[in-house]
Amino acid sequence: MSMKASEWEFRNRAMVFGIILGLCFSLYSVDSENATAMLGTRIAGRVHLNEDLATRLLFWFAALVLAVAALIRTWASSYLNASVVYAAEIKSSALVADGPYRHVRNPLYLANVLMAFGLGSMMSRAGFVFAVVAMWVFCYRLILREESELRASQGARFEVYCRAVPRLWPALRPGTASAGGQPKWTEGFKAEFWYWGFAVAVAAFAITLKLPFFFAAMAVSIGLFWITSAIRAKR
């Protein structure tokens, strides 16, 4: 079987992402121990720190990871139109090589892998592992499909870009010169504002340690995503 995602997978990638996360949370049915609580217990024992404090700090770190993921997506989307970011079909008529795209070829998918780590803090041990692995594999399949289309449409130009900029692990220094594009931060935030809700959700739990606050923030974020997607589809 080809590692490259099918057309159906790409067109319905948002749904697949949601299914992955839903399945991961459901794994509490086979593994009842929270991944962050387990790690907090181990860290507290080694550094002689209060167990509750160690666990709470880990949840705060997870919220920070999610905020970084949201910032990366916002930065990337500020160089693309939301209609491109969330398009049902691959847009390969242009090659963007500005902003985060000078450091990593697929910043949007990098953010999704980070999101799996961040939201994994709220999952069981089995859920966390499955979330990270499944998200990485699915993102990689999507990347292979997108890059095959870009290679076909952009030819040698894309090959040069691939040799200069890593696929998913970002380089600290830009691998290519700026193409002169300017970020449209307002547009980027409009496209990704719902994604920031993931960081808010985990931060709310870190503050209160009450699951209803986490799930309420998650529900609002996902609801905003589907509402904006529906509005975008009607345009």
Image: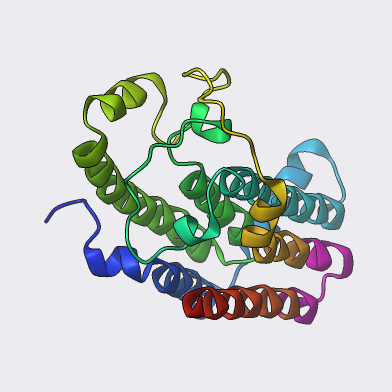
Prevalent SS, magenta region: helix
Q: Nearer the viewer, residue 193 or 17?
A: 193
Q: Residue at x 66, y 45 (%)?
A: 184
Q: Residue at x 43, y 69 (%)?
A: 20
**Residue 121 seen:** no
Q: Look at the picture and state if 81 lies above or below 34.
A: above
| Horizontal and vertical percent position of residue 216 | 74, 80
Outermost left residue: 1
Task: Give the image quarter of residue 13.
Answer: bottom left
Q: Residue at x 74, y 63 (%)?
A: 202
Q: Nearer the viewer, residue 2 or 92?
A: 92
**Residue 19 seen:** yes
170 to the left or right of 59: left
| Horizontal and vertical percent position of residue 215 | 70, 78
Q: Look at the picture and state if 45 lies above or below 38.
A: above
Q: Residue at x 50, y 33 (%)?
A: 101
13 to the left or right of 78: left
The answer to whether residue 212 is magenta is yes
Q: Which residues are magenta?
A: 203-215
| Horizontal and vertical percent position of residue 159 | 26, 26
Q: Look at the picture and state if 172 lies above or below 220.
A: above
